Amino acid sequence: MPTREQFLQFLQQNPLSDGTPIYVDSFQGFETYYSQLNQANINVTNIPSTSTTPAAAPTPHMTVDDLLGAPGRESLTVLDPLRRGRATWFKYDKGKISKAILKMMKSDLPRAYPTYNHLPRDVKTCWFRAFAQQFDWERSITETVKVAYEKKAQKSFSSNLCAWKDKWKLNKDPPDWISEKAWEGYVLMWQDEKVEAKSSRNSTNRKSERGGYGIAIHNTRATSFKTLKEKKW
């Protein structure tokens, strides 16, 4: 029977995917999981020590369905739109999902992105795979979960970004976990927004003069005294 140290060492040397946060502490029953990997002809009996460089080997690519089928997920929060049993759902989760998304932003935000929708597809895939490590659901409703998750992720991403922007406006230090590259990117983005907003306000102010007609432009030709007199009468 393997030890927990061997199991954690195996996960470190065979990550789920590049950039995917690994919340191994959320998993129980790792002995059973180890046995299943062994039966799948994955060599874990001769794991090299961390002091040596392991030989190059294919990295197991676990899908969300693979994660949902893994043993030892009994302690995870269950998602179900009908909230049957002990299950919960988005907007009823008491902030657990928002905290999970923030954890993903802290772990895997390569550079500045204005919205969640601007994230690269592979980053979104990694985040959802990480989400499946913290929450459990029936595999038959994965698409339903994903749609609700995407909607929540968009809102949470924007909310967190607004909080960071407020810090910047007050000249406060950036979050200690954010990379220098990402923070600099956001600062440039917010500075551009500030310039654009000022330009828009100036344009609006100019158009507001003379009842919305803007600044008067004198483009009429010279008018004779006789013509002016005729117009007057």
Image: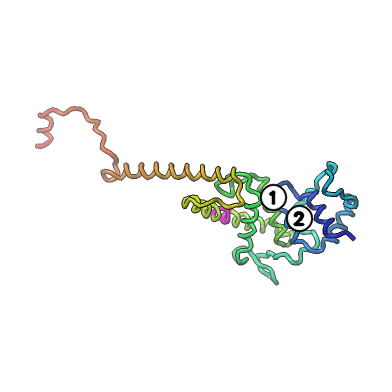
Quadrant where the N terminus is found in the figure: bottom right
Q: From the image, state whether disc 2 or disc 1 is nearer to you.
A: 1
| Residue 155 drawn in magenta | yes
Taking 154 as reference, is 72 left or right?
right
In depth, the one of 210 and 52 nearer the eye is: 52
Residue, x 69% and y 50% (percent of image)? 126
* Mark 2 residue crowding within 10 angstroms, few (<14) / some (14–19) / many (20+): some
Residue, x 80% and y 55% (percent of image)? 8
Q: Quadrant of residue 64?
A: bottom right
Under mark 2, the amino acid is Asp
Say whether disc 2 or disc 1 marks the residue closer to the N-terminus: 2
* Mark 1 residue crowding within 10 angstroms, few (<14) / some (14–19) / many (20+): many
Q: Is residue 29 above or below residue 116?
A: below
Task: Find the magenta span and give its range.
Answer: 154-158
Assign the magenta stretch its main secondary structure.
helix
Q: Which residue is mark 2?
A: 65
Q: Is residue 40 above or below residue 207?
A: below
Taking 18 as reference, is 117 left or right?
left
In depth, the one of 37 and 109 nearer the eye is: 109
Q: Position of residue 209 (x, y in %)?
A: 28, 44
Visual colour scheme: rainbow
Label 2: element kind:
helix
Residue, x 63% and y 48% (percent of image)? 109
Q: Which residue is mark 1?
A: 126
Label 1: element kind:
helix
Under mark 1, the amino acid is Cys
| Residue 229 drawn in magenta | no
Q: Quadrant of residue 103?
A: bottom right
Q: Is residue 171 above or below residue 91?
A: above
In depth, the one of 167 and 212 nearer the eye is: 167
Q: Position of residue 175 (x, y in %)?
A: 57, 52
Q: CA distance from mark 2 to mark 1?
A: 14 Å
